[in-house]
Image (cartoon, rainbow, N blue to C red):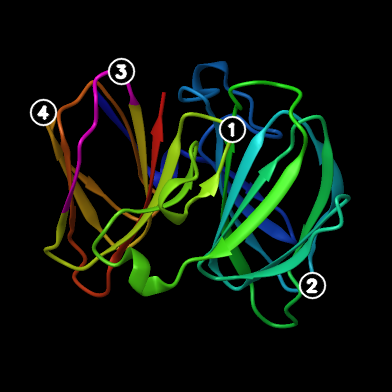
Amino acid sequence: MIKVVTSAERHTSNREWIHSEFSFSFADYDDPSNAHFGCLLAHNENELKPKQGMHRHPHHDLEIITYVVSGILRHEDDLGNKADLQAGSVQVMSAGTGISHSETNPSETENVRFLQIWLLPNRAGLPPKWNAKYFPPDSRRNTLLPVAAGNGADGALAVHENAAVYLATLATGRELIYPQTEERRTHVFLMDGHAEIHCSDGHFHLRPGDAARIRKCCDLKIKGMSSEGNAELILIDLP
């Protein structure tokens, strides 16, 4: 089963200082029929204006994964961590028993665009922790690069859930195969460019901002279809 959720179907939150697109119920968007996909609770695309940000606020019992698409995102938390995350960086924050953090754009002139993914952890009450890593563009070219995973294997950042997050940059005509198993879920989100997904349910074309929610399909084939540039995507494997 595959369900394509187009960019236009997302919920738009447009404030003076931040533009957000919510794939699932979040903040002022409440839709009980669209609350989660397995343990994936949130998948937000944000664009934060220069010198703006979200002041320090708390979280608990969440695995929060952030990917910086463009610009610089500044993170600070009450564990003493502070970092300016450049484009290509992935941040994992295990909120556990509680963590407070802020996210700001330190630039005077450039917006920062970032994705934020919330996963429900496999157990509650864990000690909070934070980590981040930069992944060079060449490391994800025409391949699925693991950037966050439950076992932290292959250089990925560790999360407290049996899930894995991959990044890929696909040139036009290049194809990836992802061997999905029947008991798992797969969430594919296209950040830029155009791509095509082939599975037992048929062929589906994805444009920027589109997502595919997939269950009980055969091996997925993902092909870059951009007339100019590359297809930039994120794939999340979920229980």
Q: Quadrant of the N terminus?
A: top left
| Residue 64 position (above or below residue 143) | above
Judging by the rendered image, the residue that carries numbered circle 4 is 200
Q: Is residue 184 left or right of residue 72?
A: left
Tell me, yes or no, whether the two marked residues, 3 and 4, touch with CB atoms within 8 Å.
no
* Residue 114 percent across, percent down from the top left: 57, 59
Amino acid type of the residue tagged 1 in the rendering: His
The residue wearing badge 1 is: 160
Q: Which residue is mark 3?
A: 183
Observer-side mark, 1 or 2, equals 1
Mark 4 in CB contact with mark 1 (< 8 angstroms) = no
Left or right? Give the position of 21 relative to 236: right
Nearest to viewer (mark 3 / mark 1): 1
Residue 177 falls inside the magenta stretch = yes
Q: What's the distance in space between the residues labelled 3 and 2, CA to CA? A: 44 Å
What secondary structure is found at the residue carrying circle 4?
loop
Residue type highlighted by circle 3: Glu
Query: Badge 2 is on which residue?
Result: 51
Cα–Cα span, label 3 and label 1: 19 Å
Magenta stretch, residue numbers: 176-184
At label 4, the amino acid type is: Ser
Residue at x-position 13% and y-position 27%: 201
- Which numbered marker is on residue 216? none
> Along the horizontal axis of the image, is 156 left or right of 2?
right
Give the residue type at disc 2: Lys
Percent position of residue 200, x then y: 11, 28
Question: Which of pointers 1 and 2 lies earlier in the amino acid sequence?
Answer: 2
On the rendered structure, is 175 left or right of 82? left
Comes first in the chain, label 3 or label 2:
2
Is tag 3's residue or tag 1's residue first in the polypeptide sequence?
A: 1
